[in-house]
Amino acid sequence: KEQNFLHGAVILTAGVIITKILGAIYKIPLGNILGDDGYAYFYSAYSVYNVFLTMTTAGLPVAMSRMVAEAHEQGHYMQVRRTFSVSWWTFLVIGFISACIMFLFPQNLANLLDRPEAAASIYTIAPGILFVCVVSAYRGYCQGHKNMTPTTIGQVIEVLVKVIVGLALAIFFVRQGRTVEIACSGNHCNHRFENGNGRLVWQQGQ
């Protein structure tokens, strides 16, 4: 369902306000659960995530939405479908490459930030890049049809899942006596690189 400019702007603004409030609510208890060190690891991993997210999605959804909008206005519906198909595969490939870099080299990325303990968090958050990239293709498609509701709903759902699942896993691992690094990552496995060959080795969390 198409929306006018004002209607779409109100919907997007409401989504931003809700996500900001949820994000603030999320950070306060998370900091209390993980402590200063744990929150520092979390923030370091999230910084790496934001860098890859910016590189993979900056401008692409907007460009896609404009192409879809122009083709739709001209009645070129086959071009709309082709634009979406090409964009979807482009987002998938870019997201997959970025996720693989974070997935395969978390220790290297953590060392660049002088936070080697954040490696587990970087590893855990890596698949998020792929999912967000694919979702961005659908958001750009909907925005090209002047429908901002899916974008707003998707953003709110993402933050809600992060808040609920993230806090639940952090509380669970802390109560289980896991290390701060594991509680921060929400993952039950720890990993390190062997000296000399850089091979990723799995270890059960302490």
Image: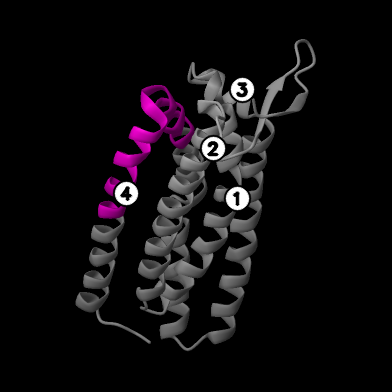
Please give the residue where the numbered disc 1 appears in the rendered image.
95
Tell me how far mark 2 sits from mark 3, CA to CA. 25 Å
Is residue 46 one of those drawn in magenta? Answer: yes
Magenta segment's dominant SS is: helix
Which residue type does callout 2 highlight?
Answer: Phe
Q: Residues within 10 Å of mark 2 (few under 14, many from 20)?
A: many
- Residue 173, disc: 2
- In percent of width and height, residue 91 lies at 59, 57
Q: Nearer the viewer, mark 2 or mark 3?
A: 2
Q: Residues within 10 Å of mark 3 (few under 14, many from 20)?
A: some
Range drawn in magenta? 20-47
Q: Which residue is mark 4?
A: 23
**Total count of labels:** 4
Q: Is 159 or 11 nearer to us in this picture?
A: 159
Query: Helix, strand or loop at disc 3?
Result: helix
- Kind of element beneath mark 1: helix
Residue type indicated by callout 1: Gly
Quarter-wise, where is residue 151 in the image?
bottom left
Instruction: Identify which amino acid the numbered label 4 is placed on.
Output: Gly
State which tag comes first along the sequence, 4 or 1: 4
Residue at 21%, 71% in the rendered image = 10
Comparing marks 3 and 4, which lies closer to the viewer? Answer: 4
Check the image and report above or below for 181 versus 4.
Answer: above
- Disc number at residue 108? 3
Q: Position of residue 105 (x, y in %)?
A: 66, 29
Name the mark nearer the viewer: 1 or 2. Answer: 2
Q: Residues within 10 Å of mark 1 (few under 14, many from 20)?
A: many
